[in-house]
Amino acid sequence: MTDLDTLIRRAWPVLREAIRMGRTVTYTELAGRGGPPLNRRHLHRQLLIPLSARCRRAGLPDLSSLVVRKDTGQPGGGWHAMEPGAGPDPDRAWAEALERCLAFEWPREVPPALLGEGDGD
């Protein structure tokens, strides 16, 4: 099984490119460009849920807000379920999370705070 740090490192160029271009990325694109074992059907469990938790712990914008469904251009229900502050308007919560993510000055390399290396994730 591939560990989470490796999955984050493999997904980082795709996420970073989307941020640089000011756009979202589809589940299919992230899974395809990140390569196996990432799979669009299991991307939440494999990567996005633990990545979102690491972003929260590190005080960083939620990178998982970048990842959307191809058919709707919005995140799947899994994003709303894992977002603790979604409140009564989950679409607005997502739009605000996406805006924070795109406006943040992300470094070229994966922020060390997102790499748990031994933290048990």
Image (cartoon, rainbow, N blue to C red):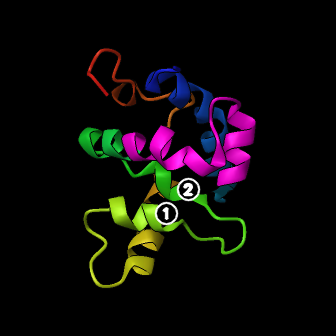
* Image spot of residue 94 (x, y percent): 44, 70
Q: Look at the magenta stretch and give its main secondary structure.
A: helix
Mark 1 crowd level (few <14, some 14–19, many ≥20, 10 Å Cα): many
Identify the image quadrant of the C terminus.
top left
For the residues labelled 1 and 2, say whether their Cβ atoms are less than 8 Å apart. Answer: yes
Examine the rendering and report whether any part of residue 46 can be seen. yes
Q: Earlier in the sequence, mark 1 or mark 2?
A: 2
Residue 113 against residue 77 in the figure, above or below: above
Residue ranking furthest to the bottom = 88
Is 33 inside the magenta-drawn segment? yes
Any magenta on residue 61? no
Q: Is residue 121 left or right of residue 4?
A: left
Q: Secondary structure at mark 1?
A: helix
Q: Residues within 10 Å of mark 2 (few under 14, many from 20)?
A: many
Q: Which residue is mark 2?
A: 66
The residue sitting at the top extreme is 118
* In the image: residue 78, left or right of residue 69: left
The residue stretch that appears in magenta:
27-51
Cα distance in 3D space between marks 1 and 2: 6 Å
45 vs 67, nearest the viewer: 45
The image shows residue 5 at horizontal and vertical percentages of 46, 23
**Kind of residue at badge 2:** Leu
Residue 19, x across and y down, in percent: 61, 50
Residue linked to disc 1: 98
Name the one closer to the observer, 53 or 96.
Answer: 53
- Residue located 67% across and 44% down the image: 30
Q: Position of residue 58 (x, y in %)?
A: 28, 38
> Residue visible at 39% across and 51% down?
61
Q: Is residue 105 visible?
A: no
